Amino acid sequence: MIDWIQDALSASYFWTKSLHIVSVMSWMAGLFYLPRLYVYHVEGLKKQGVEADSDMDKLFQHQERLLLRAIMNPAMIATWIFGLMLVFTPGVVGWNMVWPYTKGASVIAMTWFHHWLGYRRKDFLNGKNTLTGRQYRLMNEVPTVLMLIIVFSVIFKF
């Protein structure tokens, strides 16, 4: 890599790391909340006996769209940008260890889950959701497990 890029990345390390952590926190908040919104969406419509395309359905769709597009998507992109900047900062990643690979695999899985949630939003939008509130509750555990793997990988650096 070009020396001036390495110098710039090293000089901005604490800013990059701080922005990465803030981005991850924002992304995780959305990954925890969107499946919960889906639970409320499914169960709220069922409990009220309300059909798809009702005012309540449209309200949930609006909230889900804003969460995904205004918070989660930008936070995911920022997480990836600042994370890659850290990866390319000299001395941050020890490629001879296991932790960068477990973290990387978990981040890729988290990104897949993010997109899976986006496809579920389209199911609601098209009136084709087939999942139950219980299934969305179970899926709500996915980001928790991935977060634990990522945090323990980075802290313990095994």
Image: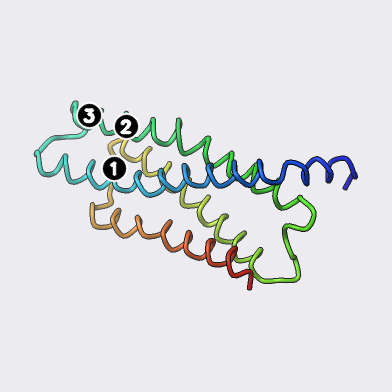
- Which residue is label 2 attached to? 63
At x 64% / y 48%, what residue is drawn? 83
Q: Quadrant of residue 30?
A: top left
**Residue receiving disc 3:** 53
Would you call the spot at circle 1 few (<14 residues within 10 Å), some (14-19), or many (20 or more)?
many
In depth, the one of 65 and 97 nearer the eye is: 97
Q: CA distance from mark 2 to mark 3?
A: 14 Å
SS at mark 2 in the image: helix
The vertical placement of 87 against 149, above or below, is above
Mark 2 or mark 3, whichever is nearer to me: 2
- Give the mark nearest the N terminus, 2 or 3: 3
Mark 1 to mark 2 CA distance (whole Å): 8 Å
Separation of residues labelled 1 and 3 (CA atoms)? 17 Å
Q: Amino acid at mark 2?
A: Gln
Residue at which label 1 appears: 37
Return the x and y of residue 36 as percentages of the image width and height.
Answer: 29, 47
Report the amino acid beneath label 1: Leu
In the displayed structure image, the side of residue 150 where residue 129 appears, left or right: left
- Judging depth in this view, the residue of 43 and 12 nearest the camera is 12
Q: Mark 1 touching mark 2, by CB under 8 A?
A: yes
